[in-house]
């Protein structure tokens, strides 16, 4: 491979803001695997945000890059799995599997797509120093002949349109809007763009915690919500506490600590079959790399309010943020019914059918 921009390249990132800024190029914030795709003829490399290779996990995207991308290019984009009108992030996670046969089975069953939103190199020209507007125009022209599963991300310079997208696209599994300064060069690894994400709150049962990697202090609180049958489902964690707060939480939660998980709603967390049947903590993760997923069970009697951006199926897509304790709420009142239902939106409309 011999390209004007060679791997490894860290993608340009975005910093969070609370409102959509004026005077930008706006795009949807895709909920998938951020990648930079390098193509030099038949050679294709798909690199993750951390510059690790994802090529073996997405053979159908490699094949599509060979036929739909320009013969020599470097493209910044997102690998997504989309069907039934929305994105499915959990199906992307299933691809990170050691067995090649399993990966190819999933690639045939739920094929992934590449949504391109920046062009870093084309033919013999490096475009990193070019302003965003020029790179966008070059991307649109270069990918004009491309067919699905390769797509060019829709973009607009109209803030009113961006606000409409922010309100509508969540129903298709997208989680906000990205704003790019029009004169911005491509700055690998820098948070030079802006992102606006949805922010909501929910009252959740605190049913356990994990220890922090630094020692016997709270790393994250394990959160639960009751489903329609009354079962307490694990919906995610809240974390990002200052170290002093982590130490204080150990003592604050001590009266609720259980000697073991017997009698706890998630008592069978070590049973692999239980993880298939419902959401409980400690399940095997292809991303954990052997990380200790054990947890300290608590009597599920306390309720806290957390901030979250959006749901992925029955769980919080990202780590939630602790807001406050809710002594006025009973654990039984913490159900999925309180969660805001986003407006439905057919992703096929966004990707052109």
Image (cartoon, helix red, strand yellow):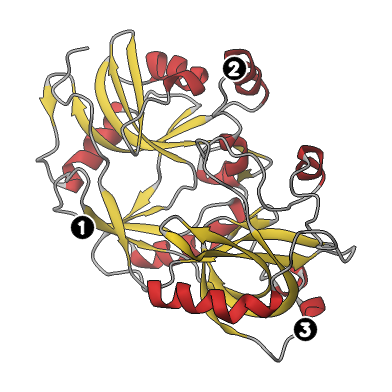
Q: Nearer the viewer, mark 3 or mark 1?
A: 3
Q: Image point 87% across, 66% down: which residue?
A: 230
> Can residue 168 be seen?
yes
Q: CA distance from mark 2 to mark 1?
A: 42 Å
Q: Secondary structure at mark 2?
A: loop
Q: Secondary structure at mark 1?
A: loop
Residue 235 sits in quarter = bottom right
Residue receiving disc 3:
330
- Say if 2 sits above or below 185 in the image: above
Q: Are marks 2 and 1 in contact (CB under 8 Å)?
A: no
- The image position of residue 206, as x and y in percent, is 67, 71
Residue receiving disc 1:
181
Q: CA distance from mark 3 to mark 1?
A: 47 Å
Mark 1 closeness class: few <14, some 14–19, many ≥20 residues within 10 Å: some
Q: Answer left or right for 57 relative to 259.
A: left
- The image position of residue 275, as x and y in percent, is 75, 44
- Foreground residue among 308 and 195: 308
Residue receiving disc 2:
99
| First-in-chain label (2 vs 1) | 2
Location of the C terminus by quadrant is top right
Q: Image point 62% across, 48% down: which residue?
A: 346
């Amino acid at each position: 491979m011999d390209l004007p921009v060679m791997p490894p390249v860290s993608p340009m990132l975005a910093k969070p803001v609370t409102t959509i800024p004026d005077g930008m190029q706006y795009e949807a914030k895709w909920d998938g695997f951020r990648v930079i795709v390098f193509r030099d003829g038949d050679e294709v490399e798909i690199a993750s945000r951390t510059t690790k290779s994802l090529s073996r996990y997405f053979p159908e995207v490699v094949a599509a890059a060979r036929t739909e991308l320009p013969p020599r290019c470097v493209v910044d984009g997102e690998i997504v799995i989309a069907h039934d009108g929305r994105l499915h992030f959990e199906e992307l996670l299933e691809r990170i599997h050691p067995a090649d046969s399993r990966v190819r089975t999933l690639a045939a069953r739920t094929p992934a797509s590449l949504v391109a939103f920046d062009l870093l190199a084309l033919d013999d020209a490096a475009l990193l120093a070019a302003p965003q507007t020029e790179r966008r125009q070059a991307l649109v022209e270069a990918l004009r002949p491309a067919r699905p599963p390769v797509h060019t991300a829709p973009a607009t310079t109209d803030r009113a349109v961006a606000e409409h997208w922010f309100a509508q696209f969540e129903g298709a599994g997208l989680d906000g809007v990205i704003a790019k300064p029009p004169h911005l060069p491509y700055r690998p690894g820098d948070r030079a763009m802006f992102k606006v994400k949805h922010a909501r709150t929910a009252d959740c049962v605190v049913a356990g915690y994990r220890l922090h990697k630094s020692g016997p202090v709270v790393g994250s609180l394990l959160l639960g919500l009751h489903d329609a049958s009354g079962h307490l489902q694990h919906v995610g964690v809240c974390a990002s506490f200052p170290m002093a707060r982590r130490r204080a939480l150990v003592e604050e939660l001590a009266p609720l600590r259980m000697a073991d998980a017997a009698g706890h709603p998630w008592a069978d967390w070590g049973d692999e079959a239980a993880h298939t049947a419902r959401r409980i903590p400690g399940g095997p993760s292809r991303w954990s790399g052997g990380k200790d997923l054990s947890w300290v069970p608590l009597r599920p009697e306390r309720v806290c309010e957390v901030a979250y951006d959006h749901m992925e199926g029955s769980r919080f897509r990202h780590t939630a943020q602790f807001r406050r304790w809710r002594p006025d709420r009973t654990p039984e009142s913490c159900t999925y019914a309180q969660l805001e239902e986003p407006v439905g939106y057919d992703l096929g409309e966004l990707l052109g059918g």
